[in-house]
Image (spheres, coloured by chain):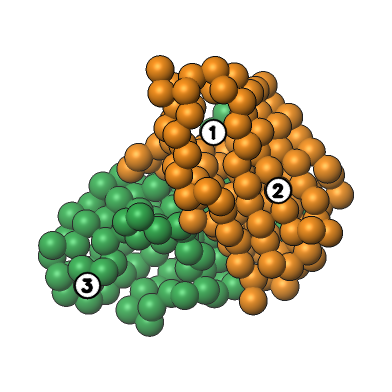
Chain colours: A orange, B green
Amino acid sequence: KQEVTQIPAALSVPEGENLVLNCSFTDSAIYNLQWFRQDPGKGLTSLLLIQSSQREQTSGRLNASLDKSSGRSTLYIAASQPGDSATYLCAVRFRKGFNKFYFGSGTKLNVKP
Amino acid sequence: AAGVIQSPRHLIKEKRETATLKCYPIPRHDTVYWYQQGPGQDPQFLISFYEKMQSDKGSIPDRFSAQQFSDYHSELNMSSLELGDSALYFCASSFGEDSYNEQFFGPGTRLTVL
């Protein structure tokens, strides 16, 4: 069964801190993995897409890594800011799952000024 | 750049009514996906279409139906609405069925069933 798990469910850090969000998935046979940001009651903002052949992707203060063999991905946020406060969702496209995304439950991040 | 358009953005219905949600993919995108996100839950896949044909089906209730039209826009029809149908409904689009192609998500339609 294809499942995606995110730990921790919630995280509160002081402004300026570097932090890591974790995502694990049950089947290493994936097409790609995508990290999203969701503000309360809002839509999904795509942050980074990592293809199965890639090890990491970077965009500004964000860096996402992928380790297929261990079924893990991490989202690293450098120098966190209050504006980073949101829920971060990890989504995986499994080879056995055809084309659809399987989402994790998200990590709710609060960056305190 | 053009994005995925969903309409309406907000919809309020009574129980047992019907609702139609619309999705307009990015130009030249021929694949559409529908997801449902209940309150405090993660998005769940409902159904997808490629070149106007249903390509995959998830946990979509029998009360729901969907189709993709010749201009590639898609509509999700929901009948006999229940309180539990209250959710944020996302549409995503991509070019082709290649699973390596990125899916681009729309802003969502928030459906409230009273």
Q: Nearer the viewer, residue B4 or A57?
A: A57
Q: Position of residue B37 (x, y in %)?
A: 40, 58
Residue drawn 39% across the image and 47% down it: B108
Q: Which residue is mark 2?
A: A73
Q: Chain of mark 2?
A: A
Q: Chain of mark 3?
A: B
Residue contact at pointers 2 and 1, CB within 8 angstroms? no
CA gap between label 2 and label 3 equals 37 Å
Q: Nearer the viewer, residue B33 or B43?
A: B43
Q: Are marks 2 and 1 on the same chain?
A: no
Is residue A97 positioned above or below A50 on the image?
below
**Residue A49, image quadrant:** top right
Kind of residue sitting beneath label 1: Ala
Quadrant into which the N terminus of chain A falls:
bottom right
Quadrant into which the C terminus of chain A falls:
top left
Q: Position of residue A19 (x, y in %)?
A: 60, 31
Q: Which disc, if any, is residue B34?
A: none
Residue B29 visible (yes or no) = no
Q: Which disc, if any, is residue B2?
A: 1
Residue drawn 27% across the image and 56% down it: B111
Q: Which residue is mark 3?
A: B82
Is residue A1 positioned above or below B10 on the image?
below
Q: Is residue B108 left or right of residue A77?
A: left
Q: Are marks 2 and 3 on the same chain?
A: no
Is residue B114 positioned above or below A53 on the image?
below
Residue B22 visible (yes or no) = yes
Q: Residues within 10 Å of mark 2 (few under 14, many from 20)?
A: many
